[in-house]
Image: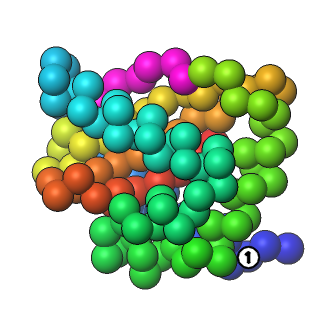
Amino acid sequence: MRIVPLITFSVLLMIVLVACGGKEITGSDANKYVAQAEGVIGQLNDSKYEEVRAMFDEEMKKALSLEAMDDLTPIINDAGNFEKIKKGTVKEKDGYYTEVLTAKYSEGELVYTISFNGNDEVAGLFIK
């Protein structure tokens, strides 16, 4: 049983949920965060966890170790070959920008919820 990753992802979910529920962002600000989130997803698809972790804020670095990120590999691999990203929405609340994107893979879809702080650091990451 993988209790440590479950706890880690629960912490991350709480961080993400704090950032959800804000006002919807459109235009160039939304495009900026969509591009950043798509970059994170691309790096996750390529198992470039060190690069993704380098974008984390201090809170995320404490909550999600590089070793724990290895647990993402089977989740992403089980979805199959990456095909495309369906655009989602960007919301802002309390200085956090949260992007929810659905990624289509050959064997299914994964929903990525990625939050950025005001310094454009990843402040929340949840994959479902």
Q: Main secondary structure of the magenta part?
A: strand
Q: Is residue 5 above or below residue 20?
A: below
The answer to which of 18 and 34 lies nearer the viewer is 34
Q: Is 1 located above or below residue 36 in the figure?
A: below
How far across and down, in percent of the image, does residue 128 sit?
A: 63, 42
Give how far across and how far down residue 98 sits, in percent: 32, 41
Does residue 10 appear left or right of residue 71 in this picture?
Answer: left
Q: Identify the residue at horizontal 41%, vertical 23% (top origin).
A: 88
Q: Position of residue 112 (x, y in %)?
A: 53, 40
Mark 1 highlights which residue? Answer: 3
Query: Does the stretch in magenta take in 126?
Result: no
At 73% from the left edge and 76% from the top edge, which residue is drawn? 3
Q: Which residues are magenta?
A: 85-90
Picture residue at 48% right of the left edge, 30% below the top? 101
Q: Quadrant of residue 10?
A: bottom right
Magenta stretch: includes residue 89: yes
| Residue at image coords 55%, 41% | 42
Could you say whether the residue bearing mark 1 is in a helix, strand or loop? helix
Q: How is the image coloured?
A: rainbow
Above or below, comparing residue 84 to residue 113 in the picture: above
**Quadrant where the N terminus lies?**
bottom right
Q: Quadrant of residue 62?
A: bottom left
